[in-house]
Amino acid sequence: MERIFKHFWHQHGSDENPRELTWEERTKKKYGLSVDTCDDCQKPTEGHDPIKCDFCLKDWHVECVPSSPDEVNHSFHTYHPLKLLIDGPPDYSDGKCGICKQELKSFFYHCSICYFSMHVRCSNDPPPPIVDAPRCHEHTLTLMARDDIFTCNACGMHGERCPYVCAPCGLMFHRDCIKLPHVININRHDHRVSHIDSPGFGLWKCMICHKKIDWRYGAYSCQKCPNLFFHSKCATRSDVWDGEELEGIPEEFVDVSPFKVIEDGVINHFSHEEHNLRLIDEDAIDRHESIRCEACTGSIFSEKHYSCMEYCDYFLHETCANLLLQKRHGLCTKPLTLLTMKKVRELRLFTCTACRKLSNGFRYECGDTILDVRCASMSWYCDYECHPHTLFLTTLDEETCGVCGRYGRLLHCVECKFTLDFKCATLPKKIKHRCDDHFLSLCFGEKEKPRGKYWCEVCETVLDPREWFYSCSGDCGVVCHIPCVLGQLWNVKPRVIHTKGYGTVKLVLNDSLSRPKCGYCGSHCQQPLMIKFSCPSMEKFFCDLDCFEKYVVPQDYKRRDDTLSYHHYSIY
């Protein structure tokens, strides 16, 4: 039989102080559902035989709730008895448990004299007084009951109360730091890193947060790369470390070369194994922009590039041909694998996780992380022309870009708090457009207010020169908005992106003498790349994906005489 009783720490269990149930609670009670997490520690209660309240549908772990309302004397706080509180932490306290440092919820013991608090579950399961932690220190460590601040020798961070100490060596450690992994892989470096007691005397900076490392305390270092160190807490962050301890596990060699050398200047690339590619060095030749790289989808002008020896219209920049089959990146804790469109859903477009641009070139992928080669090739620290200081990928928190104002993953400047998102950081430095015979160069905005007005050559509207824009590298005085030059699909190569028996969707260059009219909005298409939809009965052009989606997904779903469901034309 189920035990039904009223606890002193909860108001329900009898008819006293009844509370009206919310709609959600009534629905759960009607269907016999309950809350899946403990109301105190917020961890799952499944399989723990929890305490339940049928009135408010709350669950608790048995170890999280007090067994009696009396005061307790605890080894962690021997100065004064601790009193049970069940109404939340006092305003004068820091609101955290003195043992686990987690936020205090409903039930905890508290000393009003010392402002010390601890969870009920922590009082029932205190840390061991003596531990052997050979990864952390060679001697046995003893738990010391003290309330003042100390500095942990493993991570160099300050701690409060009850460190583990080594009396002969005079060292102190956080409870969590005695379990720090010894050898790990991090996504900010290609080699394994190991925990050391001290980097040695010097002025060192952490290569993750780019703040000072105190050489007197522990850190992570690379045995192959001297003078490269990481804070212990930074290297073991959940967005940096994959969570695996590698001590004692031999390092495996992975062949990441993307091609085989056939002879001098001739290779066989994994993305085009049926034919060999020859290196073309044409410094004096200015190629047409319609020749595009299969990997980055960018135009090939006078750069060195590889071309198919069988003339099958397959080109790769020399740098893109050298992209590794596997690499680490700051946006994923696991290695990313290089894939071509032949290896994934052929023809479809994908969205880059970093810059959120559409692309149909090569991609680096691992789980939910998908990066186009532009973003994957960017280092997590770079010197960019628009800013005098080095920019770093210090965190994965999404913030606002200091250039375009968009919200996303950013590169930061730790000196002046400047931010730059991946989309702005990967904009082409030079590009060709039909509006001018010369190259257009990316300008990073003018600080002083201009005397006259700037007019975009493409859309013929006013351009604010204090923002980024493209301008002619010659003396033409041509200026253009960035969206007008690049368009919505500037990271996409012209090709068929969807085909079925109903019709074909193809991306084509807008390079004819007269710009075609959009099949949805009726305006002349201005973007350099537009969508061509053709079927046996018709052929239409569209400005961008927005117009195409509105055309193939009509608002009136009853009229489907000349349109087809967008389900048949999913291009993502």
Image: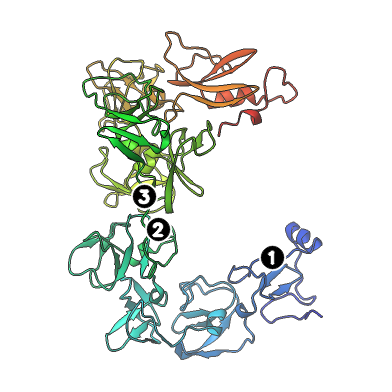
Q: Secondary structure at mark 2?
A: loop
**Amino acid type, mark 3:** Asp
Q: Nearer the viewer, mark 3 or mark 1?
A: 3
Q: Which residue corresponds to mark 3?
A: 255
Q: Which residue corresponds to mark 2?
A: 240
| For marks 2 and 3 on the same chain, the one whose residue lies earlier in the sequence | 2
Position in image of residue 515 (x %, y %): 46, 12
**Amino acid type, mark 2:** Val
| For marks 3 and 1 on the same chain, the one whose residue lies earlier in the sequence | 1
Calculate the distance from the C-alpha at mark 2 to the C-alpha at mark 1. 33 Å
Quadrant of the rendering where the C terminus is positioned: top right
Instruction: Say if 282 sits above or below 350 in the image.
Output: above
Is residue 471 visible in the rendered structure shown here? Answer: yes
Position in image of residue 316 (x %, y %): 35, 31
Q: Which residue corresponds to mark 1?
A: 35
Quadrant of the rendering where the N terminus is positioned: bottom right
